[in-house]
Amino acid sequence: MTALPAHTPALSPTETDLLDRYWRAANFLSVGQIYLRDNPLLRKPLTREHVKHMLLGHWGTTPGRTDRSC
């Protein structure tokens, strides 16, 4: 394992913004994969018909959930 340098420079505001946008997009796609069966780009107002009735399948492509409130 390679050690990190003693001082790792902080991300610039642009890099931080890009990382935040990437993180939000990845989470949006994950939620769509898990819960939606139609209208993934939300081009129409979300309705009950767009949501899966039962969550089935492998969630290996989505990040783990860290909250325990669900």
Image: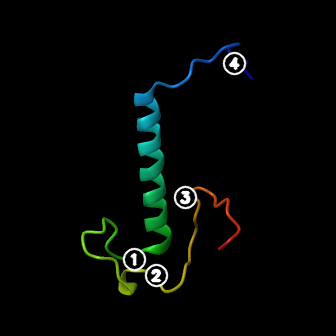
For the point 36% across and 86% down, the residue is 49
Q: Are marks 1 and 2 in contact (CB under 8 Å)?
A: yes
**Disc 3: which residue:** 62
The secondary element bearing badge 4 is classed as loop
**In the displayed structure, would residue 25 be above or below residue 42?**
above
Amino acid on which disc 3 is placed: Thr
Closer mark to the observer between disc 1 and disc 4: 4
| Res. 22 image quadrant | top left
Identify the image quadrant of the C terminus. bottom right
Disc sitting over residue 52 in the figure: 2
Q: Are marks 4 and 2 in contact (CB under 8 Å)?
A: no
**Disc 1: which residue:** 37
**Disc 4: which residue:** 4
Q: Are marks 1 and 4 in contact (CB under 8 Å)?
A: no
**Earlier residue among tags 1 and 3:** 1
* Mark 3 neighbour density, 10 Å: few (under 14) some (14–19) many (20 or more): some
